[in-house]
Image (tube, rainbow, N blue to C red):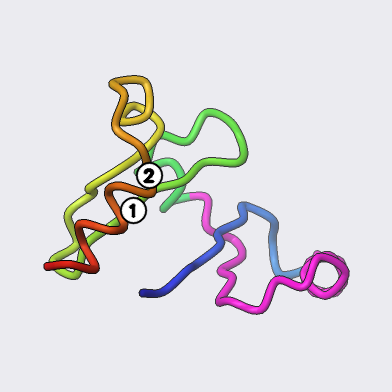
Amino acid sequence: MEFISLTPDSIRLLPKIKEFLSRHSITWRTGYGADETLDGFKVDGYPAMWVIDRQGVIRWNRDSELKGIQIGNTIKSLIDE
């Protein structure tokens, strides 16, 4: 399992991004300047989350939650696969 953060902030903000990540003990990979990717996911607010399986299929997002599907159950089922 891997966690990834994406931000639309550009490389010029990298020192501030690194300071934020350090202050909040965020140690997983973080991609900056990810506007195109975030647009592709139709992000309209933050934070936004997805669970994506090994084949690249989105298995959970905020819409799933609205349908009553809990993120923990989705992650557990993927671990069990």
**Residue 76 image offset from top left, x and y in percent:** 28, 58
Identify the residue at image location x=28%, y=21%. 67
In the picture, residue 78 is in which quadrant? bottom left
CB atoms at circles 2 and 1 under 8 Å apart? yes
Neighbor class of circle 2 (other Cα within 10 Å; few <14, some 14-19, many 20+) is some
Q: Residue at x 30, y 43 (%)?
A: 60
Q: Secondary structure at mark 1?
A: strand
- In the displayed structure image, the side of residue 59 where residue 32 appears, left or right: right
What is the total number of numbered labels drawn onto the structure image?
A: 2
Q: Residue at x 59, y 61 (%)?
A: 33
Image quarter of residue 16: bottom right
Q: Which span is picked out in magenta?
A: 13-35
If the image is split into quadrants, where does the C terminus sit?
A: bottom left
Q: Is residue 24 left or right of residue 67?
A: right
The mark that comes first in sequence, 2 or 1, is 1
Q: Of the numbered discs in the image, which one, if any, rests on residue 10?
A: none
Give the foreground label among 2 and 1. 2
* Residue 1 left/right relative to 47: left
Residue underneath mark 1: 51
Disc 1 crowd rating (10 Å Cα; few below 14, some 14-19, many 20+) is some
- Closest to the observer: 17 or 54? 54
The residue lying toward the viewer, choosing from 75 and 11, is: 75
Is 46 above or below relative to 36? Answer: above
Residue designated by label 2: 71
Q: Is residue 59 above or below residue 56?
A: above
Viewer-side residue, 11 vs 74: 74
When asked about the image quadrant of residue 42, the answer is top left
Q: Which structural element holds mark 2?
A: helix
**Could you tell me which residue is drawn at 52 percent across and 50 percent down?**
35
- As shown in the figure, which amino acid type bears the numbered disc 2? Ile
Query: Is residue 38 magenta-colored?
Result: no
